[in-house]
Each structure stands twice: as structure tokens, then as C-alpha cells.
Amino acid sequence: GVTTTTWMQHHGQRYLALGAAVLATFCRGPLFHADRIRPSLAFSVAIGHTKFSGVVATASVDSRAVNAASTGTASHYDVGGLNRRLAWRSHSRFRTQARSMGTVGQYTGPILTTLRDYTRPVLAALKARPLFYGLFVAPNVILLVALILVFLGGRKDISNGDAMQEKWARYANRPALRAAALMAGGVRFGAIYLRAKLARNPEKKHDLLVAAGKRAVRELVQLGPTYVKLGQIISSRPDSVPDEIVKELKSLQDNVPSFSGARAKAILEAELKKPVSELFKEFDEVPLAAASLGQVHRAILLDGRQVAIKVQRDKLKEMYDLDLPQFDKVTDMMERFKIGVDAKTMFKDAKVILYREIDYTAEAENTHRLNDAFKDEDWIKIPGIIDEFTSRKVMTMEYVPGIKIDNIKKLDSTPEIDRQLLGKLLAKAYLLQFCKYGVFNTDPHPGNLAVDSMVPGGRLIMYDFGQVAYLTEPQCDGILQTIQAIVDLDAKACVKAFVKLGAVKEGADLAVLEAKIEDNFRTGKVKSKRSKRKADNEEQEASGPPKDSEVMKSFVLPSQLAFVARAITQMRGVGMMLDEDWEFIDLVADQVVELQLEKGAGLGYLANQFFKQFQFGS
């Protein structure tokens, strides 16, 4: 008896009180009287199956006994096969009468006494019912309801494009609803992704990652165009996101739920001010592709020319007005923590580009400029714009079909196409955009790139010039000189190139920058396959290279260079799909000298290059 009582005092009180309180709170109905049954319920649960010092006491309470107890009458029941009588004198406390029989009776008496003593605090707590509900029950009920709503919300159909358009329009007018949807989507995706991260079985992990990818697609589509574009960017980064998720996100490049042909016709007629029948001989209501901002339909003009018509989705500006101001919060945080980029300027320029993207007249202007730049090249094709059928929300261009650049299976089955050559052409196209023409597409994801077999090895087709950035002449020269400096492993030339790019703050110690870059070249932290190797017998200075934190204070990242970095990052993802050994600098190194000469480099430049080739080898 002493052993049992001591155990109850030291270990049983908290569990008894908690269990009794929780059960008493949630139990309702005729069987469980709100006031009278709670002590009995706590008692029954506590001794329902108890083992102390090898002695087991089992209590069974049938429904008739409980009902009788709830009405205040006495009832008989068995405890471990022993008859016990429980008599109720009031609803606030009870007394137990136990008749001990044999050895077991020595233990049951102290147990019942202890239960009576420790049930009293529970009853006192329950009398403060509003406080108990407010502190414990209500928050848990709210959390449970919220979780149910979160996971039920993930089952909504996203295949109906018109319904999605209406949903996005509601989001544009109700920011709080949008914020709630964002948080709920994050919880749904995170729950699956966390399970995948914790899974040990490879097959189970693979299946969960696929499920996480599908969930990400659903959530991004439900959130609208801005988040679909985010998914497009992530889908071109197989080096930083699991392959299973990347594969699912690729569907966002040109397979976003499309709206109906009737809606597309209505937009066309509103923008071009004529009935569709008076504009086109034929109009295919089924879109060729649907992306974040619009969808493309094939049509035939009255003069017989085949065209592709890009029709913009509704409420895009309103959605951008809701989403893009969030960039300001991000930039404020980056400024607060002194992150070494010109965040405010970068995001300001990003917003300008994104708003220009939903003005198809601006995209038509960008397309004209790049079309003119590459018009004499047979290895690349940029569809021409038909201006008389173009407005702010409609753009009509030449119909130039091709194989999607990430359809590796189809590319390999086409004898005229060479994937490695396509990788070189992609790198060459961007070298010319960066360093010769000063205008480039910042968004080279696979949905904007295709291939046909009009020339041996394959012709590169580039679509969608809504997101375009411009470079100044010094910046074009700086990029070219940076590439050359990395190839030559020339730290001094690299610093000069950074200065020309505008990436070095005024008053920075150029000697410190040069020392750090030299160390990065020597250790191989910065290099290319084309880099000319220096002798291995050079020794590092005793003082060591400058610290990264010291050097980063001297750098600033202009917004144009941020877009260059983004384009190279996305291009690298596409290039590695075509050729796993793809590297931008390696593929463009041969064209650098040619471009330098076009820009006016003379015999001194050629002599310097010859000397470096002779000194270090190629």
C-alpha cells in the first residue's frame, strides 16, 4: 500500500489530472452527465488498467453502471473480480467503499483514496470552465479546424482555366485571402516535402518527391501568374532542386491551365475592335500552349499567312499590383542586413521589366530589335511581329513551330539535330546579346526555346521577349573583358573589367581586390575549362589572401548584372539538359577574340593574346 501511494504521489498526479480534465471537457450527452460523471470518469480511466509492483487491478464499468452513477444512484461493479459499491453523496465529491478480499484488497484501498485526493484539483479546475476553454480548448479547436480547411483546400480542381481566371481575379481584390492561400499552400507542400526528406526507403522517397512536385504545381497555379513564373525559374535549375520536382515544374513553362477559346475571342475582339471572322480566315480555339501570362492560338490571316496569336490573361496588372510590392519588403530586409547587392535598384528595375512584360506592344518592340540583330544568321530564328494585329493584350507573330528544347527524346530521334551543337548555339546567342547588341532576354527557360531542322545540326528558335534588359556599351565591354580575364586567369585585367562594369564601389582598394581574385584563380575557386593554367610553384604570401567579408564591402551589383546572372543561371540549366559538360565561358571563348577585334582591339591585343598562349599554353 505504501509503495502504491508513493508512486501515485510522485508520478500519477499530473497524468491523472490532465487525462481527467481533457476527457471531462469533451464528454457530453446522456451517458456523460456534465457535472456528476467527471469524477467517476477520471476514476474509471485511471484504474481501468493499472499495474503496481506486479499486482494488476482491472476495473470494468458497464454502461448501466455509468448511467446509474450519472443520476446520483449507487451501482455495483467489479474491480479485479471483487465487488465494489460506489455511492454518490453529491456532484462535487464522492466516497468509495471497498471491501478488500485476499491480497489484492491490500492495494485497492490506498489506490482509491489517492485517486479521490488527486481528483479534487481537477474538479476545481473544471469549475473555472471559461478560463479553461479559453486557454486550452478553443486554440486547439481553432487549429484543428484550420488544418482541416488547409488540407481540404488542396483538393480544388485546377484544370478549368476559366475558373482559375475568376479565382485570380478574386485574389486581386482580396489581399487577405491571397495571403491565407499562400500560407496554406506552403503548409501543404511542406508536409509532403518534409516526409520525403525524412524517408529512408529510396522508392518511398522518390514517390514523395514526385508528389511534392505535383503539389507545388497545384499550389503555384492556384496562386496565380507571379508564382507560376517563379515555378518556371525554379524548373530551369536542376542543379539546386530535386529532379523529381523539376520534372513536374516543367509543366508550368507551357502547360498552365488554359482559358476557353470563347474568352480568347472576346479579348481579341475587344483589343482589335473587329469580329474574329473579319480578322482571320481560321482561328483555332484550342491553344497551342498556355503559360503564366497568356496563351497562344494558331490562326490563318485573310491573305493566307499562318500566324501565332498570343492572348493575355485577365487581371494581370491587378495581380502584379498585389504581388510585386512584396519585393519592397524583401529589399528593406536586405538593406537592413547590409547584403552586398543594390537590392532596391535591382527590384525596382525588376518591377519595371515585369510590368513591361504585360504590355505586348513593348514585347513587340523588343522582338523587332532582336529580330533585326539576328536577321542575317541562319542558325537562329526569331519570329517576326505583325504589327497591325498587335495591341497591349494581343500580339500576332509568324508561326514558327519547333521541338521544345527540353524534349530530349524527340531531339535524339531527329537525325538532323545535334544536341551539343545546339548547346554551343545557345551560348553564342547570349554572348552576342550580352556583348554585341546590348539587349538580352532575361528569361531563357525551356518554354521559350525550340529547335527545328532547317539547317544541319538544328536551328535555334527563340520566343517570348517580354522580359528584356538593356546594357550600356561599357557594360558590354566589361562582360567581354571579364570572360577574357577568366580565360587568361589575369586578376589585374579582371579588376579593370569589374570597374568598367560598375561593380566596384568608389574608393575601393583595388590592390585588395586583385589579391583576392588572384587567390581565387590560384586555388581554382574561379576558373573555366578554357583557363590557362599557371605554374604550380607559386607560393602564397605569408599574410594570406584578404577575407571574403573584407572584399565584398568593395562590390556593388548593378541591376543589369543581376539580370545577366539570372539569364546565365537559367541558360545553364537548359545547356546542361543538352550537354552535361556545358559551360558558358568554355563555349564562347573562341568568339571572344573575334568580338574584341570587332570592337576595335588592335595589334597590341593580338600580341598580348599570343604571348599568353605561348607562356601558359592553351
Image (spheres, grey):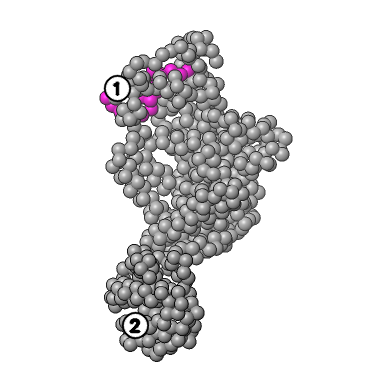
Q: Is residue 498 magenta?
A: yes
Give, as a three-letter code, the residue at label 1.
Answer: Asp
* Mark 1 lies on residue: 509
**Magenta span:** 488-507
Q: Quadrant of the N terminus?
A: bottom left
Q: Nearer the viewer, residue 590 or 583?
A: 583
Give, as a three-letter code, the residue at label 2.
Answer: Phe
Q: Give x and y (percent) for residue 422.
A: 61, 33
Res. 54 in view? yes
The quarter of the displayed image where residue 73 is located? bottom left
Q: Quadrant of the C terminus?
A: top right
Magenta stretch: helix, strand or loop mostly:
helix
* Mark 2 lies on residue: 94
- Identify the mark nearer the N-term, 1 or 2: 2
Q: Nearer the viewer, residue 337 or 434?
A: 337
Q: Give x and y (percent) for residue 258.
A: 56, 57
Res. 369 in view? no
